[in-house]
Image (cartoon, rainbow, N blue to C red):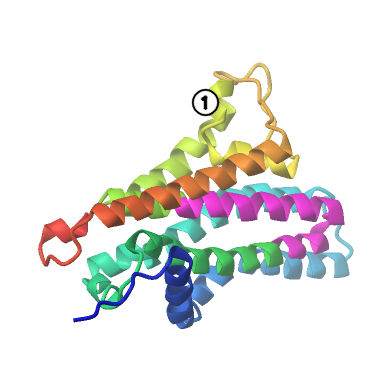
Amino acid sequence: MSTRAIPSPFQTMQAVARGYLPRVMQVRGWVLAAIPVLPVALSLILTTVLRAQGERIPPALYLSAFHGVLAKFMLPIMALVAAPAGIREDIEQRTIPLMLARPSTIWMLPFGKGILWYGWGAIWLVVACAGLLGLGSSPEAFIYQAAALVFAYWAILAFMSLLGLVFKRGTLWGALYLFIWDPLVRIFPGNLQRITFVHYIESIAGTRSTEVAANQMLAQEQITTPVGLAILILVVFGFVCWGLCGWKLQATPLGLAGVESEG
């Protein structure tokens, strides 16, 4: 009896991405696209109406939209929407054995599905940042803002995917981290600021959502990581998380019908 050779990691990723691509274009994918674009589009419509009425628009409105809406809320929500659509969803629905009906490099499966959700989301993050040009942003600011969100999305999506494989309530733990821990960057000492995503977004974008006054209780001096180093940290962190996702999937009993197959 002849056996088929196990494909290379790249072949596995290519096959998974090609087969799964139509799923990205379904309802969840368009919801993901609307999350960053819709708030910016509504802001553009509102400012257009106000300008037509002779109202003065604050010149720093685009900063409020970037930090207060896109980075603070829309980006984490995108990761919370996209991450469960990866391997975790196949494990919970007991469809993962179907993916293994043909030989494959198992540890590459999370990345194969995740890269689609990353690429699709990154496109719309760039579109949303381009919309900020209509709110007063500059071409230079657009480049740094788009880079901040795209690289942060890479790291956050990988992080959320890992939590989803390691913990049964990974989405909840991820939400607590993104919406409770990350905003505390304003009061963290320097070294603790470095383990928040907000710190790297602000370092790459070159702006902050708020400045901390010296007389605020528990306020700490805000530090900045050089842009190149901040990007490198997010990229490496993302790859580490995807690698751990693959390791976790490789070590998980996949053919079981009981709780063991849930990780």
Q: Give the residue displayed 68% in from the left and 17% down from the top.
A: 214
Taking depth in this image into account, of 240 and 157 the one nearest to the observer is 240
Residue drawn at 71 percent across, 40 percent down: 228
Q: Could you tell me which quadrant the C terminus lies in?
A: bottom left
x and y percentages locating residue 7 in the rendered image: 39, 70
- Position of 94 with respect to 221 (left or right) is left
- Magenta stretch contains residue 243: no
Residue 23 visible to an observer of this rendering: no
Residue depicted at 72% across the width and 60% down the height: 129
- Percent from the top left, x then y, of residue 88? 31, 62
Quadrant (top left, top right, bottom left, bottom right) of the N terminus = bottom left
Q: Residue furthest front?
A: 1
Q: Position of residue 201 (x, y in %)?
A: 64, 43
> Which quadrant of the structure image shows residue 137?
bottom right
Magenta: predominant secondary structure element? Answer: helix
* Residue sticking out furthest to the left: 258
- The percent coordinates of residue 45 (x first, y second) are 74, 70
Q: Is residue 200 above or below residue 76?
A: above
Left or right position of 164 against 49:
left
Q: Which residue is mark 1?
A: 192
**Looking at the image, which residue is at 31% across and 73% down?**
103
Q: Height in image: 199 above or below 75?
A: above
Tag 1: amino acid: Leu
Could you tell me which secondary element the residue under label 1 belongs to? helix
Q: Which residues are magenta?
A: 129-158
Q: Is residue 153 magenta?
A: yes
